[in-house]
Amino acid sequence: MKKKVLLMGKSGSGKTSMRSIIFANYIARDTRRLGATIDVEHSHVRFLGNLILNLWDCGGQEAFMENYFASQRDNIFRNVEVLIYVFDVESTELEKDMHYYQTCLEAIIQNSPNAKIFCLVHKMDLVLEQQRDVIFQERQADLMRLSMPLSCTCFRTSIWDETLYKAWSSIVYMLIPNVKALENSLQQFTNIVDADEVLLFERATFLVISHCQRKDHKDVHRFEKVSNIIKQFKLSCSKLAAQFQSMEVRNSAFASYIDMFTSNTYVMVCMSDPQIPSEITLINIRNARKHFEKLEKVSSSAPAITHH
């Protein structure tokens, strides 16, 4: 099942850097060596086994942008499932950025009216911390107004913290077929093992694709932090020709298990009851694998939605 994802925005806004971090295992500082994207770079990213993200990273130089809207209009904007438009928060040409965004939306309305629209207000690390909320809220209000009659979802992002994972997890979540059945099963599993929280990560990107929570947790960014930490740890393992399979972290207050789950996912189970031995939780994880493998097969064989 293929889903076309358009990644657009002005040259230098950070599109290729974020794509490289999420899908090509780059770390933030390594993205400095990436050059500007020339015209359109296509990549096919296999996600959850049979879901293939057909990612079109569109170079943002003016000549290319004009070309997309003129001679390449139908080719670029046809059959789009998701448009991700990236804005550099420090841009000195905000009016021009907004003009290109609106032109882009007009082409989407004509060619892919059912596409989901996401706007990323990027490089937020360059804004003083005490001003970030206000600036993002202003941008979000402008973008939502400009997007009418379509609706857009806005995220603030930076390659230097967990906000990038938060945005991309939310975007990819919208593309997963059968996601409700997956969540229902995760809820049952969480109750059976008596866990505080269970997270499901996609194996290649380590994006959170589903979670179930039974106890409140103060840190709203915990999923993305875990994604980031484990991904870096996996990369360190592969540099040493070792393969990361599972991990247990335990102290007097909690125990947490990360384990390979289905062929396309990892699971993380968090417990705060010290009476439950590790072996029991690990057996429960092993016993749940077959059920989740079956769910994945059903969702991956669901028919693709095509636009006419």
Image: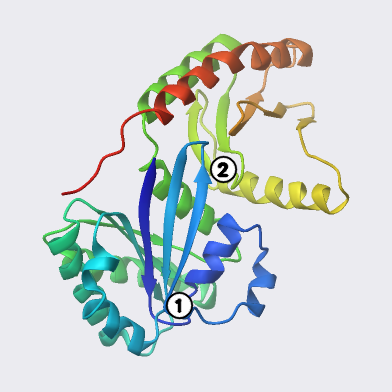
Nearest the eye: 144 or 302: 302
Q: Position of residue 131 (x, y in %)?
A: 44, 73
Residue drawn at the location 19% of the way across and 50% of the way down: 114
Tell me the colour scheme of the image.
Answer: rainbow
Q: Which mark is residue 273?
A: none
Whether residue 201 is visible to the viewer of this picture, yes or no, is yes
The image's mark for residue 13 is 1
Rate crowding at label 2 as few (under 14), some (14 to 19) or many (20 or more) other CA atoms within 10 Å.
Answer: many
Please tell me which residue is depicted at 16% across the width and 55% down the height of the picture: 113
Residue drawn 84% across and 54% down? 239
Residue 62 occupies quadrant: bottom left
Circle 1: residue type: Ser
- Secondary structure beneath dot 1 equals loop
Seen in the image, is 243 located left or right of residue 272?
right
Number of the front mark, 2 or 1? 1
C-alpha span from label 2 to label 1: 25 Å
Residue 223 shows which numbered tag? Answer: 2
